[in-house]
Image: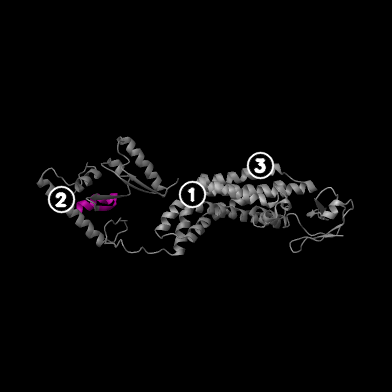
Amino acid sequence: MNPSFFFLLLIMTGLDAYSARQVVTTLRRLAEKGRTVIMSIHTPRSEIVALFDNVILLSQGSALYSGPTTEASVYFANHGYTVGEFVNLAEFMIDLAAVDTRDGERERVSTARVHHLRQAWTERCMTPEKTNNTVISVEIAEVDILSEPKKVGFQRQVQVLTRRGIKIALRDPLSVAGMAFGAISISFVQGCIFYQLPGSRAGIRSRIGALYSAFGLWNYLILLVEIYRLVPEFRLFDLERAEGSVSVPAFLLSRRMSRLFLEDIPMPLIYSLVFYFMVGFRAEATSFFMFFFIMVLSHYVAIAFATLCVAVFRDFAGASLFANLMHTANSLPGGYFVNADQMPVYTQWLKWIVSIERVTVATMSTDLFCSRLISTFSVPLSSTNSSDMITVLSDKCTIVLVLINLIQSAHSSQVGTSLRVYPCGPKTRSGIQSV
């Protein structure tokens, strides 16, 4: 938790003078870093009062003064109550606000004093002086609490929520550093496992596995991290939405805008820079940025899954369990753990909607594996496998991958099958023709 507001009630009760000063000094440092601290106190030391920016003096539920601490003595002196030279300002103000009930005369005098100060402050609030100092108004005018609150516009919601999200992120640098460390460590480990894969058939199979594991692990990492952060944020969102101050689109849009240049772009970029070149994919700007773009899309898919999980369950235990189930279901139908053709007919269509399979196929269909060929070729296939991979090196040593599913007739015979591969590239399609 890293709150922006602190509401503290009598936090110095039971503390000695030194400990109380240390507590308030710590709160002062937090206030100087941009946080707002509101606290109630009784009879503090004069050194503690000097640490406050503003002070509010209350008596019987009404304000007698509200404004800068340094101007309090001047204000009361203007109304006939002068602070002594060696008198604690806080104790002096408490004496002014107290009603003495020991006898009738003291009660009458103290009540008249409190009434006079209350009237004087109310008049000042109704006709505030033109000054550069900030005055906290407590009782300015009557407010109709039964009237419907004014709704905040969508643009204003996005602006306020985005600024708040940026402040929260900047005040929690360890979270951003942890994300960066996770991106570097996971991409480095995967890069070591799939380091500089060759262009052979086995190497290309490993490249497919590298892509699948890259998108799968990054998707899972973002999924859990986002759920962990969304659970407390949704509690605040529910309260603000109940008050009519925040809408769902504004909340979702502002979260991504506040993290666009802190996480959504830098983290996939770090992951891509480490993993892409360690594996040995094509060292071309077009191929790399296509990989990076698909990685960003996978990043946002994981965030969307996490938002759905938290929206359904609202607690970390239920949302994380549901997320693991969804991630498992998202991983299996792609055909990398189980051959998609061997799955039941009524489940084979799932591979067309799961995100991990889609981003992997999208990456393989780019210039990452496929570039233009010069010629057509023929090759005999073994009848012992139901599928095979053919790799061809062009004059520029560009790896081209064709995944071949043999028909039953080719599988049952010992006769070679002649295959024709057409040029493949960003503007052409690859094809297989059985001769």
Please state which of residues 151 and 26 is positioned toward the viewer in this rendering: 151
- Look at label 1 and name its amino acid: Val
Mark 3 vs 2, N-terminal side: 2
Name the one closer to the observer, 87 or 107. 107
Sequence-wise first label, 3 or 1: 3
Q: Nearer the viewer, mark 2 or mark 1?
A: 1
Query: How far is mark 3 from mark 1, CA to CA?
Result: 30 Å
Q: Amino acid at mark 3?
A: Val
Its colouring scheme is: one colour
Residue 427, position as x, y percentages in the image: 74, 64
Q: Which residues lie in the magenta part?
A: 65-78
Number of the label disc, if any, that sits on residue 111: 2
Q: Is residue 71 magenta?
A: yes
- Whether residue 327 is visible here, answered yes or no, is yes
From the image, tell me which residue sits under label 1. Answer: 231
Frontmost of labels 3 and 1 is 1
Earlier residue among tags 2 and 1: 2
Q: Secondary structure at mark 3?
A: helix
Q: Are marks 3 and 1 in contact (CB under 8 Å)?
A: no
Q: Quadrant of the N terminus?
A: top left
Q: Position of residue 347 (x, y in %)?
A: 67, 54
| Residue designated by label 3 | 189
Residue 402 belongs to magenta span:
no
Say which element carries label 1. helix
Q: Is residue 285 visible?
A: no
Spatial CA distance of label 2 from label 1 is: 50 Å
* Side of 315 where 210 appears, left or right: right
